[in-house]
Amino acid sequence: MVTMETPEAPVPLTALSRWYLYAIHGYFCEVMFTAAWEFVVNCNWKFPGVTSVWALFIYGTCILIVERMYLKLRGCCPVLLRCIIYTLWTYLWEFGTGLLLRQFNACPWDYSEFRYNFMGLITAEYAVPWFCASFIVEHLVIRKTLRLRFHEGPEDGWSNHRSDAGGGGGAAGTLGGGRRRERSRGMGNDANGYLKVE
């Protein structure tokens, strides 16, 4: 009698793993946004994106807290109200972290040249970009990240899957079938506020 070993069920990502993905997302978007701003304002075809290593901690933690908000609010608040709450939180977080870093002369942004800035740490001109970013973060980052699963074990997670259709046996057919199923499931001061490094 042959006994088939039951594979361990995939588990959700840990909070630290999700924090890492959120940090990388925020870091990447910061570079892309500042590069696009530099092109629009100064027509700079070099697209120099500007950010700081501090952005990893700031964005990772901020979005992880937004994730908690999303899980609490999704059943009782419409999406527009949720995004307004996320935007207000983003302003509060940006001001708090900026004020803390400024005590050590380590704050990498300064909005002093913006008309509606407060202490150079936040500015009302960024309200719409932050609102749009909040919508994108909820719909394209947080929701997708919460669906990710981690397969614990020595195998790749697909070795025991059979092909969807007849034929195509062997390891290649097994892996191909698993991948087909996975695909079918859909798995100086600059104008942008950042300080230029000479």
Image: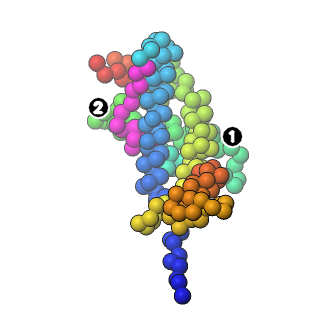
Q: Residue at x 51, y 72 (%)?
A: 7
Q: Residue furthest top?
A: 43
Quadrant containing the C terminus is top left
- Image: magenta residue range: 47-61
Closest to the observer, 157 or 122: 157
Q: Is residue 165 above or below residue 77?
A: below
The residue carrying pointer 2 sits among few (fewer than 14), some (14 to 19) or many (20 or more) residues within 10 Å by Cα, namely few
Quadrant containing the N terminus is bottom right
Q: Can residue 135 be spotted in the picture? A: yes
Q: Nearer the viewer, mark 2 or mark 1?
A: 1
On the image, the x and y values in percent for residue 23 come to: 44, 43
Q: Is residue 144 above or below residue 95?
A: below
In the structure shown, which secondary structural element does the residue marked by tag 1 occupy?
helix
Q: Can residue 85 be spotted in the picture? A: no
Q: Quadrant of residue 194?
A: top left
Is 108 within the magenta?
A: no
On the image, the x and y values in percent for residue 69 come to: 58, 51
Residue type, numbered disc 1: Leu
Q: Tag on residue 105?
A: 2
Separation of residues labelled 2 and 1 (CA atoms): 36 Å
Closest to the observer, 15 or 187: 187
The residue carrying pointer 1 sits among few (fewer than 14), some (14 to 19) or many (20 or more) residues within 10 Å by Cα, namely few
Residue type, numbered disc 2: Asn
On the image, the x and y values in percent for residue 183 come to: 61, 50
- On the image, numbered disc 1 is attached to which residue? 80
Q: Image check: 143 left or right of 19?
A: right
On the image, the x and y values in percent for residue 168 come to: 59, 59
Q: Residue at x 46, y 25 (%)?
A: 34
Q: Residue at x 69, y 55 (%)?
A: 75
